[in-house]
Structure formats: structure tokens, C-alpha cells
Amino acid sequence: MITQQAVSGILFADIVGSSQLYELLGDVEAERSIAETLRTLSRICQEHQGSVIKTIGDEIMCRFDNVDTMIACAIAMQKNFNHSTSPKSTTTQSTSGRLSAHSIKIGLHLGPTIMRNDDVFGDSVNVAARLVEYARRDQVICTTSTWRKANLDMLTRLDAKGRSLSAIPIKGKSQRLPVHEILWRTGDSDLTRLVTLPHSVECLQPWQLRLNYFGVTLTLSPDKPSIALGRGLQTGLPVSISSASRAHAKIISNQGQVTLIDQSTNGTFVKAEGQEEVQIHRQTIPLRGKGVISLGIPGERAPEHLISYEYIESKQSIENSTE
């Protein structure tokens, strides 16, 4: 096992609206479309001297040796998927003639990393992953420290500008992190659109979503507002049941509203406490209170593979639950 330490640029790109693609295109074509989009993102990364570290569902993680190639790559990725004239369009025609997911959002950070074999670890990875969660469709978000390291001549050539956004909370850090949006479209600086990030948690009640699978407990919170579920080992909660897809579902939070998004072949079964089991397929369902989740099969047919969940809101409730 070879371990190295280095300052790296970490880029996360996430396909926006991938769940809707399944409804729009059907399962087979949607899978094909997402795979093609990830291949295009991989190619652009490599064209900018980057390394593809991994793909997780509809997301790609890349590493760069310097900040300028990373920013140039992010802008190239966005320009590649923004040929459509309609801001509401979720697909664009690919060079092969197939429909491809065209809207992406990107998070960037430059900082110390640990490289082990073909993977990258460390606080910088966590920061970049956090940024892509906060980004909106078509945005490139980076830490302010990363923006300040960018070469001015390079930014001028790319006609890229930046503006400060609201600082965001990062798990494990006592203070919020200053962030910038990279304005990569010509005339972007003249837009009169909302530029503060929509996920501020200052006025929200603290919350947690606790997941338990085979005795392993994971907790979502404002500091970690999303997780991927599936058979893939790179998901946040890997499962061992064959009915689950590799990238089966996501759980995300938007201002404390926790939602499960099914992305699977067989669907997801959710049973809230005191209610009947519900199946969703390429759909979403809110998670509140207590209940169980079964991936790809009714819960009663595989009770040993149930994922239990509990949503806890308000500071007092969280404190009481940890006593």
C-alpha cells in the first residue's frame, strides 16, 4: 500500500435532475445517458491533466495538481453541457445522437490530501464534496482560498469572474467557510439573480436522520446532509442485498426537509412507523419520524436487510436522544 501526501485540487461534479431522466427517457436509455455524461466528464477531466478518482452514481470525483487546470476543467465541463437555449431543459443531444443529461453542478477545493493507491482522502475531499451539495444547477462553487490562488491571466483568458457567496458550515470546522461562485458565462456578472446560497441553516432547527443497517449507524445532519445507498462499495451506505442497484437511492436534505430519491431498477420500499409500506420507483418520498427502508424488495421478504431510520428535530430532542 503506497501512501503519499500532496496539495491537490479536488473537483466533484454532480448531474442535476438525473432522477427525472428515468421518467423522461425510461430506465435503459436513462442509464445509458448518465453513463455517457460521466464518460464525457471523465474525458474533459483528462484533457485538462486531471485524474478521475471515482464515479459514484451520478457524480464524479477528479484530482488535479494545480488550481488553474482544475478551474479551467470545471468551466469546460459546464460549457460542454450548456448548449441548450432553454434553462429548464434537462437533456441535450450528444455526439452519438442519444439524449444526455446536460445540467451539472460543481464543487472545487485546493488543499492537502492523502493519496493511497488509486484513491484520495483528507479534509480537502470532504470540503469539495460539501461544496457540490450546496451548488445549484450550472454553478461552479469553490472555497475563497481556492479562488484567490487562481492565476489572473488564466481567468481573463477564460472570461471567468468570481463573486463572494454566504459562508457555509463544514463538519468538523468551528467556523463557516467563505466561498465563491465562479461566473463562467459571458455576461454572468451582469445578471441580477440571487447569489447567496439557498441552504443557510442559521434559522433552522437542528436535525438529525439516523440510519442503521446491520448494527452500523450513520447520522445525517446539517453538516452531512446527504448520503447514497446501494450495492456499490463507494456509496455512503453499501448494502449486500442482490435486489438493490449499485447506485440505488440518495437521501438528501434541503433546509432540514429530508427526502429519499429512488434511482434504482427495482424501486425502494418505505414503511413509516404506524403506516402501510409504500413503494417508490424513480420517485421521491419525505422521511419523517421513524420507519424502515428496503432496497428493491418488500421489507417483509428480507427483514434482515431493512435499513431503519429516525428523524429527530430540535436541539432538545437531539440532546435527549444521545443521553
Image (tube, helix red, strand yellow):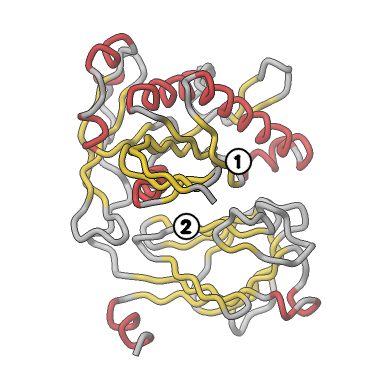
As drawn, 83 above or below 198: above
Local crowd size for mark 1, using a 10 Å CA cut-off: few (<14), some (14–19), many (≥20):
many
> Is disc 1 placed on a helix, strand or loop?
helix
- Please state if 133 lies on the left or on the right of 167 as rendered: right
| Residue at the image position 61 percent from the left and 28 percent from the top | 91
In the rendered image, the residue lying farthest to the top is 157
Q: What's the mark number on residue 226?
A: 2
As drawn, 241 above or below 135: below
Quarter assignment of residue 249: bottom right
| Residue at the image position 50 percent from the left and 77 percent from the top | 310
Q: CA distance from mark 2 to mark 1?
A: 16 Å
**Along the line of sight, the residue nearer the viewer: 95 or 242:** 242
**Looking at the picture, which amino acid does disc 1 mark?**
Ser
Quarter assignment of residue 243: bottom right
Whole-percent x and y of residue 59?
55, 41
As drawn, 67 above or below 22: above
Whole-percent x and y of residue 245?
72, 55
Q: Earlier in the sequence, mark 2 or mark 1?
A: 1
**Along the line of sight, the residue nearer the viewer: 23 or 58:** 58
Whole-percent x and y of residue 304?
72, 80
Q: What's the mark number on residue 182?
A: none
| Residue at the image position 53 percent from the left and 23 percent from the top | 46
**Along the line of sight, the residue nearer the viewer: 143 or 117:** 117
Quarter assignment of residue 70: top left
As drawn, 194 above or below 116: above
Whole-percent x and y of residue 270?
65, 70
In the rendered image, the residue lying farthest to the bottom is 323
> Is disc 2 placed on a helix, strand or loop?
strand
- Please state if 258 lies on the left or on the right of 113 as rendered: right
**Looking at the picture, which amino acid does disc 2 mark?**
Ser
Circle 1 is placed at which residue position? 18
